[in-house]
Image: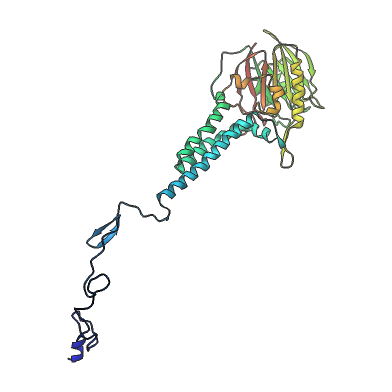
Amino acid sequence: MDARAIRGAGPDGARRRSGPRSGTAHGTDPRAAPDRSGAPTGAARPAPPPAPGRRETDAGTTANPTRKADTTGHGDGARGGTATRRGRRTAAVAAATATVMLVAAVSPSGPGNLFGLLQTFLPWLGLGVPALLALAAIRRAPLAAVAVLLPAAAWCLLFGGLLTDKHADDGDVTVVSHNVHDGNPDPRGTAHDLAASGAGLLALQELTSRTTPAYEKALAGDYPYHVVRGTVGVWSTYPLRDPEPVEIMPWTRALRVTADTPKGPLAVYVAHLASVRVSLGGGFATQRRDEAAAKLAEAVRAEPLPRVVVAGDLNGTPDDTSLRPLTGHLRSAQRTAGQGFGFTWPAAFPVARIDQILVRGVTPTASSTLPRTSSDHLPVTASLRL
């Protein structure tokens, strides 16, 4: 064997160069000078103590398994701050929703009559309450969950009373009001549906020269008295007298007549206020409707009879402040004796109650909507105690 190979092999079998290095035969001096730590360079250094939050094992030092690693670089405080900020945003939205409800309920129309549009669909803002509550739960934000109580309280203040059943004993007179739709494909069927309600008075709107004869023929057997003026009419089981149109628009869309009930005379108004329009440029256009409502209100205020019923399609809800000249002096049968909102339009999926039965000098004992007919509105009915 080569002697150079023997001299170049160390204890571990690794080949080293032969010959002296640094004054030694094999390049290693056990008396080497110490390093800065004071230990000889050839000696093994002691291991440093484990860092806080870490434990030492036979295999070495590992992270404490009970402590989760912070991969965000922000720490628990940052995570808590983020959750707080999220909670504040949701809480702000909840407070804004409550404010909009309360302000819109009492505000005048404003520019573009936007408040009037909002008032028409105001009850639907209540859907924001469960949505905000779910958001608060997903984000685990207690502050937001508490803030959701604000819109919930506002909604209950405005509409909570509508959810209770206020039905009382049967009244003396039952009234049905229905916008039968001028394009109704089955006026005869609609007439039979209305007669099946057993009402003593029917107030119909959107009559036409085509459909009026069909209603007269179909209702003749149950309602011996009727009056039609323009596009509105009244059918009655009680004698009718003193009919006259009410001038609320250039063409006749309102009628006043006296019904002689067993409990005394009752002034009956049937009306169809002007339609409203929504556009990007004009906003919620209600000027013609509001003018017609003001004229109808003037006629009702001048009514000499103490008992008054106003029934018809007002193209607006009792929450619409623009209709307050009329609705402010009358009681809503639905709000007084109904249960729920009684939405009537559109008939396929009602979202607003624009068909009303309003009274003065009588007591509503029940109010509701009737099943759908061939019209795009639902009929409404109310029982009245005279």
15, 75: nearer the viewer: 75
In which quadrant will I find the C terminus? top right
Residue that extends furthest to the bottom in the rendered view of this protein: 2
Residue 348 location in percent, x, y? 62, 34
Figure coloring: rainbow
User: For this view, does 129 lie left or right of residue 285?
Assistant: left
Residue that extends furthest to the right in the rendered view of this protein: 250
35, 258: nearer the viewer: 35
Q: Is residue 314 visible?
A: no
User: For this view, does 180 lie left or right of residue 90?
Assistant: right
On screen, residue 329 above or below 182: above
- Quarter holding residue 322: top right
User: For this view, does 244 lie left or right of residue 40?
Assistant: right
Q: How many marks?
A: 0
In which quadrant will I find the N terminus? bottom left
Residue 291 location in percent, x, y? 77, 27
Q: Residue at x 53, y 29 (%)?
A: 153
User: For this view, does 182 lie left or right of residue 384?
Assistant: right
Q: Residue at x 74, y 21 (%)?
A: 297
- Quarter holding residue 231: top right
142, 122: nearer the viewer: 142
